Amino acid sequence: MSAVDFDAVKRYLMGLQDRICEGLTDEDGQVGFMEDNWQREQGGGGRTRLITNGGVFEKGGVNFSHVFGGQLPPSASAVRPELAGRSFQAAGVSLVMHPKNPYVPTSHMNVRIFVAEKEGEEPVWWFGGGYDLTPYYGFEQDCVEWHQTAKKACDPFGEDVYPRYKKWCDEYFFLKHRDEARGVGGLFFDDLNEGGFEQCFEFTRAVGDSYLEAYRPIVARRKATPFGERERKFQCYRRGRYVEFNLVFDRGTLFGLQSGGRTESILMSLPPEVHWDYGYEPESGTPEAELYETFLPHRDWV
């Protein structure tokens, strides 16, 4: 493999999108993903795949994109001067799955590559990504297994990798204005370019490939759990936190909207039904209160 083989990463990402959509379609059991192929006027395009009103998933999106341009905006080179005057291309797979059953958690995953090039100079590149879990009702087994799978993906790359990226995830997916975590975390990494291109690509593949292994068993275990209006109402309330995070803090969402990205694909992560209740406090001793008291505070799950 060459020093920076963007095409190999692109092929992997498109295959990953295929495999994830196939696995989640099997788990849903009723409907599949529709595909919307789109082009970006400034360069590039993507495949947005959406599942709606399924047997398990009320709404889910698995998006592949590959965008490129002749020169990065001044805001990028202001933060990273080494990007000045470079052309760029970026590719990634990003997904969010919003289940119908409140006992099935929402999940998010993203893996991506960025490369900036200038004639006569070495390319600037990095990988990023991760995944995180957002339960509405907490189960120790689900959280432990989710993190065990994440740790297993990281372990071949060093014993410090999982703790470091788990901590980064905890800190990133945190609603500062609420002083609470979005969910129970997982992995988050960015600007990864240490150890050479091939090793970084291998780690990114390990993360991407482990997502279905982490999520599908949880979905299978919880999707037939009976629920009623109370659980549904709490799910819709907690989905409000997801919206708040994505629109206020999420760097990918903000960059996409501010840089003229494709709005429908960027906002596919938002849940289909959500509400906000003024001054809501869960009743003490309830499963709803347990989510706040036991599951949302940062913990060592493994």
Image (spheres, rainbow, N blue to C red):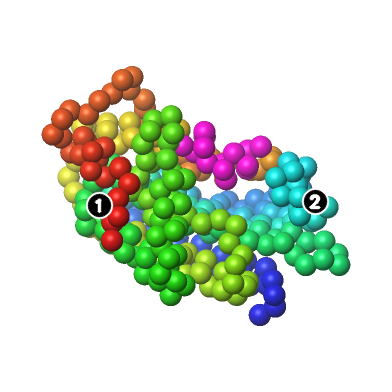
Q: Nearer the viewer, residue 44 or 83?
A: 83
Q: Can you name the residue that lies furthest to the right here?
A: 120
Where does label 2 land, which residue?
Answer: 84
Residue 249, horizontal then vertical, whole percent: 52, 37
Question: Which residue is found at the position 15% from the left and 30% from the top?
Answer: 284
What is the crowding at mark 2: few (fewer than 14 residues within 10 Å), some, or many (at least 20)? some
On-image quarter of the C terminus: bottom left
Q: Specify the quadrant that holds the N terminus.
A: bottom right
Regarding residue 112, the answer to whether it shows in the image is: no
Residue found at x 68% / y 72%: 5
* Position of residue 37 measured from the top left corner of the image (x, y, whole percent): 62, 53
109 lies left or right of 12: left
Residue placed under numbered mark 1 in the picture: 223
The crowd level at tag 1 (other Cα within 10 Å; few <14, some 14-19, many 20+) is many
> Dot 2 lies on which element?
loop
Residue 82, quarter of picture: bottom right
Segment colored magenta = 245-258
